Amino acid sequence: MHSMSHQATFKLGLCLVLSFVAPVLFDSSTLAAVFVIEPDGSGDYATIQEGVDAAVDGDVIQLGYGDFSGAGNHDVDFHGKDIVVESASGSAPAVTLVVESGHRAFLFQSGESAAAVLRNVTIVGGDPGTDGGGVYVTGASPTLDGCVFRDCRVSSFDRGGGLFVADGAPTVTGCLFEANLGGVQGSGSAAAVVDGTGVVFRDNLFVGNSVSEGAGTLRVIGGEVRVERCGFLGNRAWGGAGIFATGSDLTITDSWFTGNESEQAGGAAIRIRGGIFTIEGCTVASNRAVASAEAAGLDAGSGAVGGVITTLFHENCTDAATVNVAAEAGTSVFLECSAFLPGTVAGDIELVGDQVNADPELCAPRPCGDAPSEDGDYELSSSSPCLAAQSPCGDRIGAFGEGCDVVPVLGRTWGGIKAAFR
């Protein structure tokens, strides 16, 4: 038997090495391209849509400073691609899509995954004449990160002034929804979700949105939705001026609802009809239901089943009385280790364990009669019975910890936070 030649041995070794190295060298993720698009049409492509059309999975499209408008810079369709479209500077105020009437900014409608990302972009003026004034998502699960939806709208009976989602599971994080408008008898002036399959809203602000004779700044119809660390301030609707959920699996944690106003129905902060829900670690204060005999804070009905845990209710009022929480007959709702004044909870509600039935000692809340209002400081004073050290369950009650003398109201809250999006 002859031994293998030196040349053959080298070729065999080289093949073995390449068999291990090639997957690393030629992994498609390492070949991702970065395209730059400028508002004046210069850059790698003339419009955002041209850049998207040229991109492949893993590519990044960076948008230069300024205002994008016109054909190719609205109704931008990701076409099922897992790509990133983002502000080149990392700042949402630096990139604005000024959307003309009859159009929206972006569409995700071809099964895009969480790797399809829209990041740090401001969308202004979307008005497509149908659902989803700013962004439309159906059958997809993209990531919307650090975006601003401002002055977008939908027509009568349509849904989602800023964002519309159907049959998908997008993650919406760090976004501002401000001054968006729902159509007459429409729903979801800021956002609407229909049959979502695990939609997550995290670290968002919903401020000054309104819908005439319609329901909800965030409207949830069926499906599963999580709301985490979000703020709803100074919004207005016919009912459910913060969140209005129907037949859904809804979880709300560490969020706050202040200064919202319902013009007719109850639940100026949260209105739930049917379905199941959990509300934990939230602050619900200074909300107003103008012409309703229902609760101004949380109003549950139509057989809804849910629990409210370590949540603070304070001065949520109707024109007739202060009613923080109400549950219609046939619902099943419990309150556990929560805060509310005596006589402000009504209906079919089970109280589990000890509650705080005293002034929560908020730093500088606004009177509920001022709603809609974005102002107020809803942190806790050092002697508040809702602080963990003083609460009956050893956990903090409400979305905020100790404040007052620590940080001034507007510096701590909405003026400063909103400025970061401008």
Image (cartoon, rainbow, N blue to C red):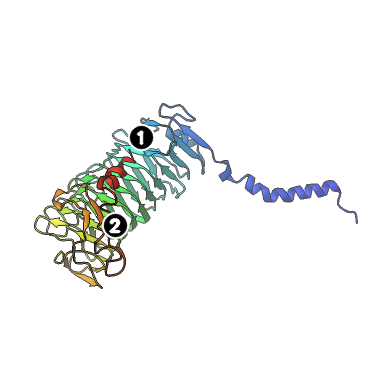
Seen as rendered, the residue at the extreme bottom is 353
Q: Nearer the viewer, residue 269 or 394?
A: 394
Task: Please tell me whether residue 222 is drawn above or below residue 106 in the rendered image.
Answer: below
**Displayed quadrant of residue 104:** top left
Residue located at (68% from left, 51% from top): 20
The disc label shown at residue 402, or none: 2
Local crowd size for mark 2, using a 10 Å CA cut-off: few (<14), some (14–19), many (≥20) = some
x and y percentages locating residue 164 in the rendered image: 32, 47
Q: Nearer the viewer, residue 247 or 203?
A: 203
Give the SS element for disc 2: loop
The disc label shown at residue 96, or none: 1
x and y percentages locating residue 304 in the rendered image: 25, 65
Give the SS element for disc 1: strand
On the rendered structure, is 292 left or right of 174? left
Q: Are marks 2 and 1 in contact (CB under 8 Å)?
A: no
Q: Quadrant of the C terminus?
A: top left
Q: Earlier in the sequence, mark 2 or mark 1?
A: 1
x and y percentages locating residue 142 in the rendered image: 42, 48
x and y percentages locating residue 244 in the rendered image: 24, 55
Which three-letter amino acid code belongs to the residue tagged 1? Thr
Of tags 2 and 1, the one toward the viewer is: 2
Q: Nearer the viewer, residue 179 or 374?
A: 374
Which three-letter amino acid code belongs to the residue tagged 2? Glu
Local crowd size for mark 1, using a 10 Å CA cut-off: few (<14), some (14–19), many (≥20) = many
Mark pair 2, 1: CA separation? 37 Å
Residue located at (36% from left, 35% from top): 96
Seen as rendered, the residue at the extreme right is 1
The image shows a total of numbered marks equal to 2
